[in-house]
């Protein structure tokens, strides 16, 4: 980054001021922004630009009408205002290390020219790929079903354990299928391959999204869109755009979220045979976008449309396999979360609790997400004992899955618990947190 484009450093006297230290420690961004304005001359419009927030949102924070809890937003504030990571309970930021101390990866050594290579007694590692060029791969509908079965297994294992360990296998299979697309095949087989490649690309993007590596996620989601477009699978294009909409809500970019889900609904409506279950899922994603924007009436309307579409689902509907997860418990829990995003905790709590009781217990990540959401709605209503009990139970599935998004939900609840940190039930929750998730708790506790 050119020197002129780098954010200015905050004065040392501000970074060491006890009031600033305390405001950062408890993530009181209303006070942080006011101190930055009065002590460093960085006005709200500049704060908004440097932290990638809207001026109105910064104004609401300063006025005490909005809290900033998402970890992605906290990280943008740290980087935009140059607040050292440890002051906000974050890992050391990349810009805190002087450039001279940054370790750069060494370039991979170049392969010697063919005539310089030492003859080997065994075949080289690329023999299989060379032979594949000379052998036309025979595919049938049974082969396509085998691919689809493996994708379903990837999704199941992703729900149970997270996608980090699966990603190399998924990417390898994606590249293999993309290679198969280069050969001429009957249209039914070719279209099937495009659909499989699109789903593998979406799944890869999902694993990066779950790891909060958003640039890589968007790249694979975009590849999935391109592959689905090749076979004119507009329902699947709608599905990918819905994933991108959800990612935008996590990045605190609600306008992008609404744009993506609107495009998804346009694709779904233009497709032949789009099922009510797909339309219901898309309406719920729209509700999430409106709730993140604070549009109460639009959120309630989208929730109503989601339920209306869901009631029209028939037993013989030709639902795509990728939407089967959107069952009644998922509809109910998402309805509760949408109300929770609006601050309607009393409405959200019984919905999320009911869905949790009915949810598949093998879906560790989903149960952890939803339990932390339930705990937050309980805490919003002043039910401290119930909230800590719910969050403590959520630590069990959270410890079973490798997911940065789960860690983010845990951190958000932990931050929300700050005013009650000395209460016995909160201390018991922290003790259990340290027992089950020592790496996460180490990043949360001062």
Image (cartoon, rainbow, N blue to C red):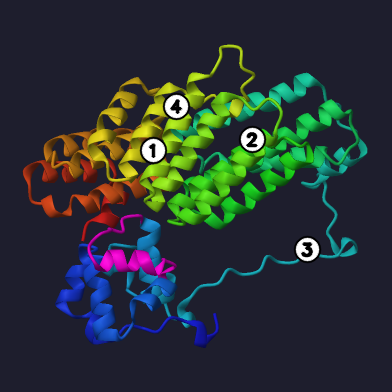
Is residue 67 within the magenta segment? yes
Where is the C terminus found, in terms of image quarters?
Answer: bottom left
- Mark nearest the camera among 3 and 1 is 1
Whether the residues at callouts 4 and 1 have beta carbons within 8 Å, the answer is no
Residue 431 sits in quarter:
top left
Label whose residue precedes the other's in the sequence (3 or 4): 3
Of residue 251 and residue 361, the one placed in the foreground of this image is: 251
Of residue 213 and residue 286, the one placed in the foreground of this image is: 286
Q: In this view, does 110 lie to the left or right of 370?
A: right
Q: In this view, does 404 lie to the left or right of 240?
A: left
Name the residue carrying label 2. 268
Q: Distance between the residues labelled 4 and 2?
A: 17 Å
Q: In this view, does 152 lie above or below 420?
A: above
Q: Give the range drawn in magenta.
A: 51-70
User: How dense is the environment of label 4, judged by Cα within 10 Å: few (below 14), some, or many (20 and up)?
Assistant: many
Name the residue carrying label 4. 307
* Circle 2 SS class: helix
Label whose residue precedes the other's in the sequence (2 or 3): 3
Label whose residue precedes the other's in the sequence (4 or 2): 2
Q: Label for residue 111?
A: 3
Q: Position of residue 422 (x, y in %)?
A: 8, 51
Whether the residues at callouts 1 and 2 have beta carbons within 8 Å, the answer is no
Of residue 52 and residue 99, the one placed in the foreground of this image is: 52
Residue 171 sits in quarter:
top right
Q: Tell me which residue sits at (86%, 31%) in the image.
A: 137
Of residue 187 and residue 103, the one placed in the foreground of this image is: 187
* Circle 4 SS class: helix
Q: Label for residue 300?
A: 1
Q: Tell me which residue sits at (13%, 45%) in the image.
A: 426
Q: How far apart are marks 3 and 4 (CA)?
A: 59 Å
């Amino acid at each position: 980054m050119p020197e002129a484009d780098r954010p200015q450093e905050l004065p040392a006297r501000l970074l060491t001021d006890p009031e600033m230290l305390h405001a950062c420690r408890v993530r009181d961004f209303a006070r942080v922004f006011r101190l930055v304005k009065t002590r460093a001359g960085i006005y709200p419009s500049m704060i908004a630009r440097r932290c990638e927030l809207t001026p109105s949102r910064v104004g609401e924070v300063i006025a005490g009408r909005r809290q900033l809890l998402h970890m992605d937003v906290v990280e943008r504030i740290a980087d935009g205002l140059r607040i050292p990571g440890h002051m906000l309970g974050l890992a050391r930021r990349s810009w805190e290390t002087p450039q001279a101390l940054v370790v750069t990866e060494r370039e991979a050594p170049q392969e010697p020219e063919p005539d310089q290579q030492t003859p080997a007694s065994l075949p080289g590692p690329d023999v299989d790929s060379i032979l594949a060029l000379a052998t036309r791969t025979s595919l049938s509908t049974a082969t396509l079903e085998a691919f689809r079965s493996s994708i379903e297994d990837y999704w199941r294992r992703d729900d149970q354990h997270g996608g980090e360990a699966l990603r190399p296998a998924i990417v390898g299979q994606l590249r293999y299928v993309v290679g198969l697309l280069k050969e001429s095949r009957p249209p039914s087989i070719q279209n099937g391959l495009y659909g499989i490649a699109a789903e593998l690309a979406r799944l890869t993007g999902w694993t990066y999204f779950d790891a909060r590596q958003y640039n890589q996620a968007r790249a694979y989601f975009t590849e999935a869109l391109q592959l689905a477009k090749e076979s004119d699978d507009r329902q699947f294009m709608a599905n990918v755009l819905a994933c991108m909409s959800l990612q935008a809500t996590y990045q605190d970019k609600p306008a992008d979220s609404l744009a993506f889900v609107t495009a998804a609904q346009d694709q779904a409506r233009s497709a032949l045979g789009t099922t009510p279950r797909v339309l219901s899922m898309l309406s719920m994603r729209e509700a999430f976008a409106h709730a993140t924007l604070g549009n109460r009436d639009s959120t309630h309307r989208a929730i109503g449309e989601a339920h209306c579409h869901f009631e029209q689902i028939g037993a013989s509907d030709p639902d795509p396999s990728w939407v089967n997860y959107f069952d009644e418990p998922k509809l109910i829990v998402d309805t509760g979360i949408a109300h929770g995003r609006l601050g309607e905790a009393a409405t959200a709590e019984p919905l999320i609790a009911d869905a949790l009781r009915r949810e598949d217990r093998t879906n560790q990540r989903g149960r952890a997400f939803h339990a932390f959401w339930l705990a937050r709605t309980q805490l919003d209503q002043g039910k401290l004992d119930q909230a800590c009990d719910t969050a403590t139970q959520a630590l069990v599935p959270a410890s079973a899955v490798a997911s940065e998004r789960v860690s983010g939900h845990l951190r958000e609840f932990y931050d929300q618990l700050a005013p009650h940190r000395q209460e016995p039930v909160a201390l018991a929750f922290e003790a259990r947190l340290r027992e089950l998730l020592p790496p996460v708790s180490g990043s949360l506790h001062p």
